[in-house]
Amino acid sequence: MKRLLVLSTESGLVEDFQSILNGVSKIEVTCYQSCCELMEGFLTLHTDMVLLDIDLLKERVTHLINVLKLIKSSVVLILILSEEHISICKQALPLGIHSYLIKPVSGKELFRIVDPILKHGNVKIEKDI
């Protein structure tokens, strides 16, 4: 089973996404609200994807991305952010980010990013900032 770990306080997004997933894809979604909890989950679970909220992490996101990639280089990283943090996103993209979404983000938008990964592996979605 595939796993998506989410570091965000956007609980509505996770609930919306999980309701779309029901019966469609076999993916387990676990939401965390702190880096420590996320790292514990990342180290103990066999995780395929991680969704990071830049609004929560701010400049610390680049450090967390580096740590996650050192532990498991194949992990798929997806970012969500508000427009005010686009400069941080630009710094993070070269570190191996699969995709990003600008808030407000719906479960349907997140599913559009995650579904091809589940079906075909790490398919890169190109976007311009």
Image: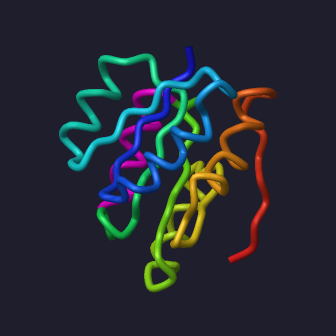
The residue lying toward the viewer, choosing from 50 and 22, is 22
Query: In the image, 71: left or right of 97?
Result: left
Count of numbered labels shown in the rendering: 0
| Quarter-of-image position of residue 100 | bottom right
**Which residue is drawn at the image coordinates 77% and 37% (left, top)?**
116
Extreme residue toward the bottom, this view = 84
Residue 13 lies, in percent from the top left, at 46, 55
**Image coordinates for residue 67, horizontal then vertical, percent:** 36, 41
Residue at (54, 40) in percent of width and height: 19
Q: Main secondary structure of the magenta part?
A: helix
Of residues 99 and 22, the one drawn nearer to the viewer in this rendering: 22
Q: Say if the magenta span includes residue 68.
A: yes
Q: Quadrant of the N terminus?
A: top right
- Tell me residue 124's x, y (percent): 77, 47
Q: Name the image quarter holding residue 84.
A: bottom left
**Position of residue 83 in the picture relative to residue 6 (left or right):** right
Q: How is the image coloured?
A: rainbow
Q: Residue at x 52, y 72 (%)?
A: 104
- Quadrant for the C terminus, please: bottom right
Location of residue 8 in the rendering, given as x and y in whole percent from the top left corner: 34, 54
Q: Nearer the viewer, residue 43 or 28?
A: 28
Q: Quadrant of residue 119?
A: top right
Instruction: Pick whichever, 88 or 113, lies toward us.
Output: 113
Q: Is residue 27 left or right of residue 38?
A: right
Picture layout, residue 13 above or below residue 4: below
- In the depicted structure, whether residue 120 falls above or below residue 88: above
- Which region is colored magenta? 59-72
Q: Does residue 2 belong to the magenta stretch?
A: no
